[in-house]
Amino acid sequence: MDWIKKTGMIASVVFVSGILIHATSNAGLEKTKTYEAGTYFSARIDFAGEETPLTITDVKERFDRELLVNANLDASTLLIIKRANRFFPVIEPILKKNGIPDDFKYLAVIESSLTNAVSSAGARGFWQFMPETAKERGMEVNDVVDERYHLEKSTEAACRYLLDAKKKFGTWTLAAASYNGGMGGVNKQITIQGVTDYYDLLLTEETSRYVFRILALKEIMKNPVQYSFNVAPQDLYAVIPTKKVEIDSSIEDLAAFAKDQGINYKILKIHNPWLRDRKLTNTAGKKYTIEIPLKGY
């Protein structure tokens, strides 16, 4: 799915900021005008269908801050747009299957920039799970297999968390905020402050900015040309077709296994980052699915 082809300019805009930013040109990104970054966005901003109350001054300014910042992180935002063409087609159907709004793909964007990121606190993968939380959500985490690096399985685990959070808080916006602040942390502030709307809560700076970062990346990625990210289709990272090989026994040498599959060790690890060792120890006969690229590698 070439998701970016579905985006385009929108007619209804709102003027917010008067800061002039001079645009530059980069490979794969043509910025040809001096523009007021973050100044134009769609008249109605929402997360998962829940409207953002931009009539509240601090809400509008918090959104504007994240829009300005991310619209001017040229290289970082461009890379995210390119990666989304490859990874959104994996994430989107899993969200849909689990009844999670499509907007949550932008939560993965702000968590990891659509990479298998590693945080200083020990979180890993696209969805940035900590080890114990990952295990609680059904993922295998050890020195040989770490499913936090498995995009499909970690997305499924994120869905399970978000469904629990939505059930607890009643809104998708608070469910998203709790992904950063924790269910306990968000619930504590709801109790102390006596309000039940994310936009009325005073939270830590990180959690306070969290949903607005999601909203900003959603706005930019849905309307890239409007924010001067003019990316040619051939510059987007393409989906690489793969075949799936099921394994229910140990593999003593992954390099030899890769060669048997017609690829090399590097390519095997790129496409299966959840394999964390040079071998796969599987004494329990668990079934694993290994992806082998067919072309474009």
Image (cartoon, grey):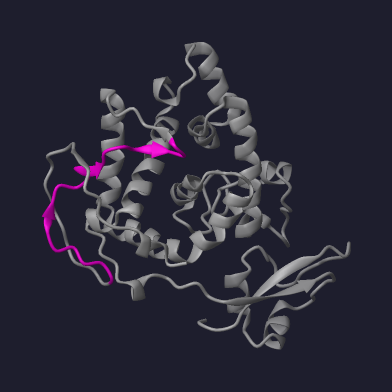
* Residue 218 magenta: no
Main SS type for the magenta part?
loop
Residue at horizontal 44%, vertical 24%? 203
Vertical placement of 66 versus 290: above or below? Answer: above
Q: What x and y, as percent, mark residue 141?
A: 71, 53
Q: What x and y, as percent, mark residue 236?
A: 38, 70
Q: What x and y, as percent, mark residue 294?
A: 59, 83
In the current view of this chain or complex, which residue is farthest to the right? 284
Vertical placement of 226 versus 160: above or below? Answer: below
Residue at horizontal 30%, vertical 60%? 75
Numbered range of the magenta stretch: 28-49
Total marks placed: 0
Using the image as rendered, state which of residue 172 and residue 33 is in the foreground. Answer: 172
296 left or right, relative to 162: left
26 left or right, relative to 98: left
- Which quadrant holds residue 24? bottom left
Q: What x and y, as percent, mark residue 290?
A: 70, 71
Using the image as rendered, state which of residue 156 and residue 286 is in the foreground. Answer: 156
Vertical placement of 199 versus 125: above or below? Answer: above
* Residue 29 magenta: yes
111 left or right, relative to 212: right
- Which quadrant holds residue 84? bottom left
Residue at horizontal 47%, vertical 12%? 193
Vertical placement of 237 versus 42: above or below? Answer: below
